[in-house]
Image: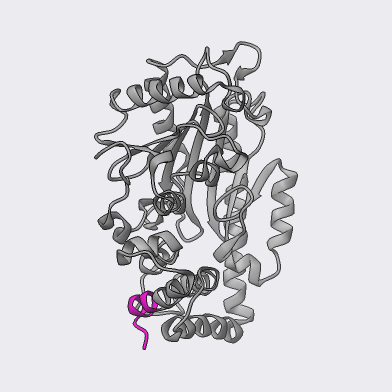
């Protein structure tokens, strides 16, 4: 594949993102686990202060090393700044690019070369070059798998550091463009599906409790995004003075088990105390999806959320959790257009989205 080509092919769009397959631990609630490291190269200014020649130097050094060091059996490199917007948005929808990286510095009037390195075909590893930091290394896993993700990213980090010198302070740790990342520069997060907590009115209490524990609660696409489809991302915020092991243990062993149990208890309560009303909500959602002729992405996500919960509860028969979860991705604008092989305006996408969902869910 050429540097400027789109790294996600049509077959991968059809198959969905690997982290959405629902085959990981605790996948009834935990959609995916993500571990991310922020790294900068010694001898180069942070991107917002760097001269064009420095940004190009970081880009070239990272490209040459990442594509030759053996990070995975196969890696695909893309020059993000040369990709069409639809492909950049598609990569963001797959959580391989941040929203900022998909847009680039052009939003602030200053653009620079941006790269993406992705392991193929599993897409577990992705590395953004010249985002906020010189390197943003990410590992994604299905279900609750922070330990496995950490072990992989730790090995990848060693491979990268063998050929690129990091900006590091003996006093402060890894140096980053944003002060909140200084230290171990580690973000561990999980994407949770929490329709039960929302429907029982307990979601705000859980969100307040997690924030009081120093965690960030964000929407489907992370920072500054909405909680579409009852999806929420929970991650650590403190990196300075905490080890990677402490962050992992607190999140995976102490905090998340409680959140998972609250969600499962909420689903049980809905069946025990409000079964008829809950079933009505679920089957209304399924009926809408099976008969709608126009669907906006937000509406599709909201209704699919209820159907997914219904499948996991055993209320909805004849559908698999994987089939429903895959639709969360396919109803996104860029995935829908790539799946159908043509670009469409908003109105046509609403029609095509409804057609696709009816086809997948056995509608009329």
Residue 116, image x, y percentages? 40, 37
Can residue 155 be seen by looking at this rendering?
no
What colour-coding does the image apply?
Answer: one colour
The image quarter in which residue 232 lies: bottom right
Q: Is residue 362 magenta?
A: yes
- Name the residue nearer the viewer: 111 or 18: 111
| Camera sees residue 61 | yes
Residue stretch rendered in magenta on the structure: 355-364
Rendered position, 163 above or below 272: above
Q: Quick check: 42 left or right of 358?
A: right
The extreme front residue here reads 109
* Residue 44 drawn in magenta: no
Using the image as rendered, state which of residue 160 and residue 144 is in the foreground.
160
| Magenta segment, prevailing SS (helix, strand or loop) | helix
Tell me what residue is drawn at x 52 percent, y 14 percent. 42
User: Percent from the top left, x then y, of residue 193?
Assistant: 54, 60
Viewport quadrant of the N terminus: top left
Residue 285 against residue 123 in the figure, above or below: below
Residue 192 left/right relative to 94: right
Horizontal side of 164 relative to 340 (left or right) equals: right
């Amino acid at each position: 594949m050429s540097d400027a080509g789109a790294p996600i092919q049509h077959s991968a769009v059809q198959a969905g993102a690997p982290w959405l397959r629902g085959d990981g631990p605790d996948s009834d609630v935990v959609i995916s686990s993500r571990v991310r490291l922020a790294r900068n190269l010694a001898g180069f200014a942070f991107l917002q202060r760097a001269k064009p020649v420095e940004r190009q130097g970081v880009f070239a050094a990272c490209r040459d090393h990442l594509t030759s060091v053996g990070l995975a059996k196969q890696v695909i490199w893309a020059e993000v700044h040369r990709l069409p917007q639809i492909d950049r948005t598609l990569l963001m929808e797959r959580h391989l690019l941040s929203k900022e990286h998909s847009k680039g510095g052009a939003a602030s009037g200053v653009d620079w070369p941006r790269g993406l390195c992705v392991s193929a075909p599993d897409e577990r590893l992705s590395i953004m070059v010249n985002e906020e930091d010189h390197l943003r290394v990410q590992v994604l896993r299905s279900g609750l798998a922070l330990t496995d993700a950490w072990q992989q990213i730790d090995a990848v980090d060693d491979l990268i550091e063998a050929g690129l010198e990091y900006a590091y302070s003996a006093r402060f740790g890894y140096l980053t463009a944003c002060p909140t990342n200084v230290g171990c520069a580690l973000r561990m997060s999980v994407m949770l599906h929490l329709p039960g907590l929302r429907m029982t009115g307990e979601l705000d209490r859980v969100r307040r409790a997690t924030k009081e524990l120093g965690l960030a609660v964000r929407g489907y696409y992370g920072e500054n995004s909405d909680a579409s489809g009852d999806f929420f991302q929970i991650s650590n915020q403190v990196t300075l003075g905490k080890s990677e092991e402490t962050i992992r243990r607190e999140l995976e062993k102490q905090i998340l088990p409680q959140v998972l149990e609250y969600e499962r208890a909420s689903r049980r309560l809905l069946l025990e105390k409000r079964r008829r009303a809950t079933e009505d909500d679920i089957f209304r959602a399924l009926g809408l999806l099976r008969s709608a002729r126009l669907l906006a992405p937000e509406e599709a996500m909201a209704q699919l959320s209820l159907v997914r919960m219904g499948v996991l509860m055993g209320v909805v028969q004849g559908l698999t959790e994987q089939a429903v979860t895959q639709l969360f991705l396919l109803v996104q604008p860029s995935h829908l257009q790539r799946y159908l092989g043509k670009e469409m305006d908003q109105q046509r996408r609403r029609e095509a989205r409804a057609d696709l969902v009816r086809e997948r869910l056995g509608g009329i």
